[in-house]
Image (tube, grey):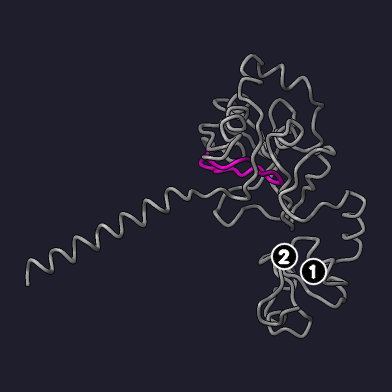
Amino acid sequence: MAVKRKHIFSLFIILILAAGAISFASAYTGTGFSHNIPSSKYSDMSESDILSKYSDTECHVEESAVCTQVVDGDTIYLDNGKKVRFVGVNTPERGVEGYITSKNFVQKLCLGKTVGLDIDDSKHNDKYGRTLAVVIVDGKNVNEMLLKEGLAEIMYMPPSEFYPYNWADGNTHVADTHSSSSSSHSTHSSDSSSSGSGSYVANANTGKFHLTSCNSVSKMSEGNKIFLSSREDAISQGYVPCKICNP
């Protein structure tokens, strides 16, 4: 009996290890965004060569720190303890084509250097606790550079102070369904407000939208309420339907 139990325990361990191997093999790929820009494109370029291609940003440096680690093309660590997620952009994940090129690009501009942050006033942190910000080097917007170089795709996640479509060009890939232009964004903004009335109410904190009659609305902080005129408007701005009231 003891031998049999031992065999069952061993089989259980093997199953756990196998599951772990499968999970590792199916590595997280994010949105699946990739690009085929070779790393060699930037190997002979200096930091100043890259920066000279861009104009000074209108973003403002709110705080500065030294970049101690580049995790990938859209995440860096600073010596003040902050983990920074480049707001409005998304680069290839580890194991996806283009990961190394995007990461090396950011390393060339940021690693070991003092970088500035313009932190998103509408949403300071993402769900992982990372600071959402525009990263600024020598007065230039690195988030914008990633998009214009084709090293990142637009990932607009409202609420946000920044509208990354303004940094991109016509060939920039978009991570989601928000392919509207800046002018249509202005229209959306005018059709919604943080006070007033509308057929739907979105929660700026959770990213969900509800019918005005939904119980969740009464529990919502007034400061998080965004009134929307239509379901299409809510979806186009990145809000997802409540699973309770099914708007």
Magenta extent: 80-94
| Nearer-the-camera pick, 44 or 212 | 44
N-terminal of the two: label 1 or label 2?
2
| Nearer-the-camera pick, 94 or 5 | 5
- The amino acid sitting under disc 2 is Ala
In the image, what residue occupies the spot 63% across and 34% down? Answer: 64
Residue 78: x percent and y percent? 54, 36
Membership of 82 in magenta stretch: yes
Question: In terms of secondary structure, where does tag 2 sit?
Answer: loop
Q: Is residue 1 above or below residue 24?
A: below
CA gap between label 1 and label 2 equals 7 Å
Specify the principal SS of the magenta part: loop
User: Residue beneath label 1, please?
Assistant: 226
Residue 76: quadrant of the picture: top right
Is residue 86 left or right of 4 when viewed as pictured?
right
Q: Is residue 30 above or below residue 236?
A: above
Q: Residues within 10 Å of mark 2 (few under 14, many from 20)?
A: many
Membership of 173 in magenta stretch: no
In the image, what residue occupies the spot 7% across and 72% down? Answer: 1
User: Residue beneath label 2, please?
Assistant: 204
In the image, what residue occupies the spot 66% across and 16% down? Answer: 45
Residue 152: x percent and y percent? 69, 39
Residue 215: x percent and y percent? 69, 85
- The amino acid sitting under disc 1 is Ile
